[in-house]
Amino acid sequence: LELKIKDSGVKRSALIQEQQEKNKRGKMRWDTILLFSLESELPVLDIRLDKRVDTMVDLGLLEELDSLVHNSTGDSGLLSQVIGFKEFEKYLELRRSGTSPKEELSKALLEGLDRMKCRTRQYARKQLRWIKSRLSECNDPDYHFRRLDSSLPEEWADHVSKPAMRDVRLFLQGELEVVERDSVKKDMGVKGCRDCEVVCEGDEQFRQHLASRKHKKRVSAMKKRVNTGGS
């Protein structure tokens, strides 16, 4: 059965095929485009994602999940799609029972946090792969893609705002040149310690941090919390 779009006279199958061809070519909606992608070194990104999960929990994520479970109609399929449900399911069940020891409850909470942070990092990497395959690989000469390195906040002006404003000005003047897609520095050597939520510039600074008293104390305290189930 061939369908036609109302008033266009074009078959639906032809429109679908045309859209698919555009997607293959990486053709965008507008003729000329300047697109910025704010990106960070993965160690830095991981620290920021972990902090985001902690903030979500502080702002009431667990209470919201508990409310959704309590008011659900029994459709576990839908609940499983809610971010955080599968990760904190065990903790929520123990908390609702009201009979679980405090140590067991605390351990389940820490495990849920770890699972959600891991899932969040995995999803972020999936998004990065999508950006690379669908946006940064476009070969259209009128399509300008710029990757800006936002790893270090103290260098925001040099690595983000100034380059972006310069490119916007040149783009509006029609003078922006096509450059290689991969414009983020790969040799910055930025490393991050998720345990301490610290960003280090270079291997030497990272080694010094790992050997520091602060880091060792932090790691020891975290191991103790996991082993004892303490909060």
Image (cartoon, rainbow, N blue to C red):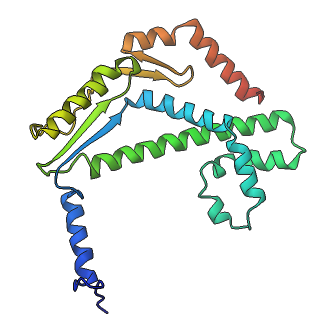
How far from the left and from the top, in percent, is residue 170? 14, 34
The image quarter in which residue 169 lies: top left
Q: Decide if residue 110 is in sight here.
A: yes
Seen at 27% across and 75% down, the residue is 16
The answer to whether 106 appears left or right of 223 in the picture is right
Q: Quadrant of the N terminus?
A: bottom left
**Residue most extreme to the right:** 99
User: In this picture, is 190 found above or below 65?
Assistant: above
How far from the left and from the top, in percent, is residue 210? 50, 13
The answer to whether 185 appears left or right of 200 in the picture is left
The image quarter in which residue 8 lies: bottom left
Between 40 and 208, the one lying in front of the other is 40
Between 121 and 151, the one lying in front of the other is 151
Q: Quadrant of the C terminus?
A: top right
**Residue most extreme to the bottom:** 1
How far from the left and from the top, in percent, is residue 86? 64, 52
The image quarter in which residue 150 lies: top left
The answer to whether 183 appears left or right of 129 in the picture is left
